[in-house]
Structure formats: structure tokens, C-alpha cells
Amino acid sequence: MPELDKEMYEPDIISVTDDDGNEILFELLERYETDEDVYVAVTRYYETDEEIVEGDYEVITLKVESDDNGNEYLVEIEDELEYEQISDILMGKIEEKYDVEYFDPEQ
């Protein structure tokens, strides 16, 4: 049997609990750090074949914040300019890493 040259893909999974206590799994696509802040690009993680085929794979850009106890949590980026700049950086990194082209529905 021939050996496989390709590495097996192991996604980085993030478990997030929403305001209603529901656990949602996301795949971490990319991370970007500045001197002051940390940002991530995530997409919903799908486990079953059916979910994978039907998934929308929307990329979500979020900011990582910490509470007084050092627990990290994800928040929306409120500032529109900050969001645009960080999204452009993260999408560029994703395009390079995964050899894909970003589709902007607003264009």
C-alpha cells in the first residue's frame, strides 16, 4: 500500500458558550496579534458529512478579550474601521494559508 505524502488536516476547535448556555463549535482559521489586541477568524465547525456539505463556511472576525481572572472570551469588533482593517489582514492570511480566494458579497 503506498504511503500518503499529505499530512492529515487537524482543525483547531474552539468551544463557545452563547448567552443561552448553548455550546457552539468553531474552527480557528487564523489568528492575528497587535501590541494591544488579539483577533481571530473562525468559521462554524461541522462534524457530520451532511453538515459539511450543507455548511455555509462564513468567516467571522472577532476580538479576543480577557476578564479579571484571565479567562478569554470572544467579542464582536464594534469599530467599523478597526473591523475592516483586521478583516482584510485575516482574510489575506487565510487566502495564503489555504490557497483560496476570498469572495466579498458586497462587491
Image (cartoon, grey):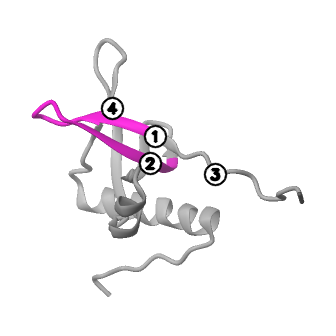
Badge 3 is on which residue?
9
Residue drawn at (89%, 60%), measured in percent from left and top? 2
Badge 1 is on which residue?
13
Q: Position of residue 88 (x, y in %)?
A: 44, 66
Badge 4 is on which residue?
65
Q: Quadrant of residue 1?
A: bottom right
How many neighbours does mark 2 have within 10 angstroms: few (below 14), some (14-19), or many (20 or more)? Answer: some
Mark 1 vs mark 2, CA separation in Å: 5 Å
* Between discs 1 and 4, the one toward the N terminus: 1
Q: Main secondary structure of the magenta part?
A: strand
Q: Indicate the secondary structure of the residue bearing disc 3.
A: loop
Q: Which mark is residue 27?
A: 2
- 5 horizontally vs 90: left or right: right
The answer to whether the residue labelled 1 contacts the one labelled 3, judged by CB atoms less than 8 Å apart, is no
Q: Is residue 29 covered in magenta?
A: yes
Q: Which range of residues does the magenta coloring cover?
A: 14-31
Q: Position of residue 71 (x, y in %)?
A: 34, 20
Q: Which mark is residue 107?
A: none
Q: Indicate the secondary structure of the residue bearing disc 1.
A: strand
The answer to whether the residue labelled 1 contacts the one labelled 2, judged by CB atoms less than 8 Å apart, is yes
